[in-house]
Image (spheres, rainbow, N blue to C red):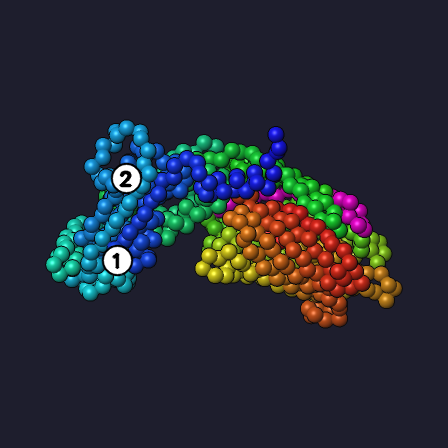
Amino acid sequence: MSSVPKRLVLAGAFLSVFNILPGEAEVRQTLVVEAGGKDLKSSIEGALTTRTLISDGDETSQSLIAAAQADYARIVAVLYDAGYFGPSVSIKLDGVEAAQISPFASDGSVGKVEVTVTPGKQFRFGRATIAPLAQGTTLPEGYRAGATAGTAVIREAATSAVSGWRDVGHAKAAVSGQKITANHPAAEVNSDIQLAPGPRLRFGQLIVSGEERMRADRIRAIAGLPTGKVFDPDDLDDATRRLQTARVFQVVSLSEADQPNPDGTLDITAAVVERKLRRFGFGAEYGTLDGGTLSAFWLHRNLFGGAERLRIEGEVSNIAQNGGGIDYELSARFDRPASWGADTDFYLTATLEHVDDPLYLTDQAEVEAGFKRIVSDQLTLQAGVGLTYSDTTDAYGSRTFLVATLPLEATYDKRDNKLNPTKGYYLNAELTPFFGISGGDGSGARLYTDARAYRALGKAERMVIAARLQLGSIMGSSPGETLPDMLFYSGGGGTVRGHAYQSLGVTLPSGLEVGGENFIGLSLELRGKITDKAQLVGFTDYGFVGAGAMPGQDGEWQSGAGLGLRYDTGIGPLRLDVATPTSGPNAGERAEVYIGIGQAF
């Protein structure tokens, strides 16, 4: 017996998936909306549970009967939201009205589902009132006489009016009465809503429930609920955010007491569920020129019962790198939230590292302590004091540094997604004054900025443009008097892909290279979805390193370009980039591979 050609088998499988070949009976569904336009039809389609069952292939006769009978109410709700208060809705299963079929009908087959909707006239508001209103309340534009009527805009108006009172301290404001009537001959709706603002209240006590290892006094300190202040929903949202960002709790829920206290205060209950105390993890990254990186960490979320966080991590990098040796780093970081007010955290870090780069060899120890203030959901400020000891060998010889630092940092993050952004922007600025205690004068300041912007293209937003600008400058200190890891280099996965790691610096008269005092980095990526999970990326990178404090002064450019793939893993995109130099003697002659988790920027 002759075998079936593989191409024919594959084609048959493909056609079967899309129900082109004969097989099991296919349920057909038609939807006719007599007037109302495409938008109304689309809204009705989205409400049909019968449509969902059929598209998922989960339909049985009984499930279709139940879904069809539920769809009457769902369709009417869509029509009422759009202002159609006299519709006619028919849903037939094999020609029989679904409302007349027993839900316990025998499990036969259903071959055809017909949905016919006659919306009727679209109603307008004859009268649209709501009172009393708090000063400054903004009602939806559509809630007015003559505008298209609909239950959605009525709900929105009621919600806006209640929120207006809550915003000025009336926490128990509510709708006390409503009269909504429809005049079918005139196609008009009259809507009259009455509000009960209730008394103006102040925040009472924060009552904590669900805590296990966390101390209740620390939960109150972290939440920062302003007891005694006039009630404000924004303060309630801020307290919730603070507890969530403490990263101790799996669940945080703040709820208001049903009744205010006799003294005009309103107690708030914070119900929390704590996360597991400890966590560990590991990571890996690889670039054909940068080499491999292995990392691991151990984390304790609640060291002393006050959300104190201790993270210890180690990293081995530049494994099998082309040039230089293997680097090692061991670090520890301690964070304590609400150490100077609810929005100011204390941190303490300690780092030991051995760096064997092509341009320098360093053994270094560093400690730093400071405060981090969360100004808003987007803006974070940080200030600290540090001490660094470094034993260094480079083009200037062997030297020992002891340097005091005053790191200052500001971050403004307006991205829609930190792991895989498609809109918004990110700005980071670091200013680090440093003072040489030994190893030469070595006093000055290091300035570094990182700006990123993202824009989605088209209505489907399947294409994203991502751009990055990096600027760096060393002021007041010569390269020979500056810690080597404060200087700037270009090349590698973090700057210009396709070029060797830290391959561009400043060449001394002796022919040896050191890091530069100024730096410019430019990157542009075009990210396009090829499936819901996968992206194809085209990118180009540019880097400049020069002598002197002014970026762009007395130096050289290098550039690279390439293609990449991203696959969304749920915890961040898996990244594969292939890049080649577009400048220098090896331009276009080799390809370098970079693998990691997360977008390049």
Q: What residue is drawn where x is 80% and y is 50%?
A: 322
- The label shown at residue 84 is none
Q: Which residue is mark 2?
A: 94
Q: Quadrant of residue 251?
A: top left
Amino acid at dot 1: Ala
| Residue 182 appears in the picture as rendered | yes
Q: Quadrant of residue 150?
A: bottom left
Amino acid at dot 2: Asp
Under tag 1, what secondary structure? loop
Quadrant of the drawing holding the N terminus: top right
Q: Quadrant of residue 472?
A: bottom right
Q: Position of residue 381 (x, y in %)?
A: 54, 56
Label tally: 2
Disc nearest the viewer among 1 and 2: 2
Under tag 2, what secondary structure? loop
Q: What residue is drawn where x is 59% and y is 62%?
A: 467
Pointers 1 and 2 in contact (C-beta within 8 Å): no
Q: Nearer the viewer, residue 198 or 186?
A: 186
Q: Is residue 201 magenta?
A: no
Q: Which residue is mark 1?
A: 35
Q: Nearer the viewer, residue 104 or 469?
A: 104
Comes first in the chain, label 1 or label 2: 1
Q: Nearer the viewer, residue 45 or 594?
A: 45
Q: What residue is drawn where x is 41% and y is 35%?
A: 24
Q: Position of residue 234 (x, y in %)?
A: 37, 53
Q: Nearer the viewer, residue 443 or 28?
A: 28
| Relative side of 556 to 186, left or right | right
* Magenta-drawn segment: 318-339
| Relative side of 25 to 312, left or right | left
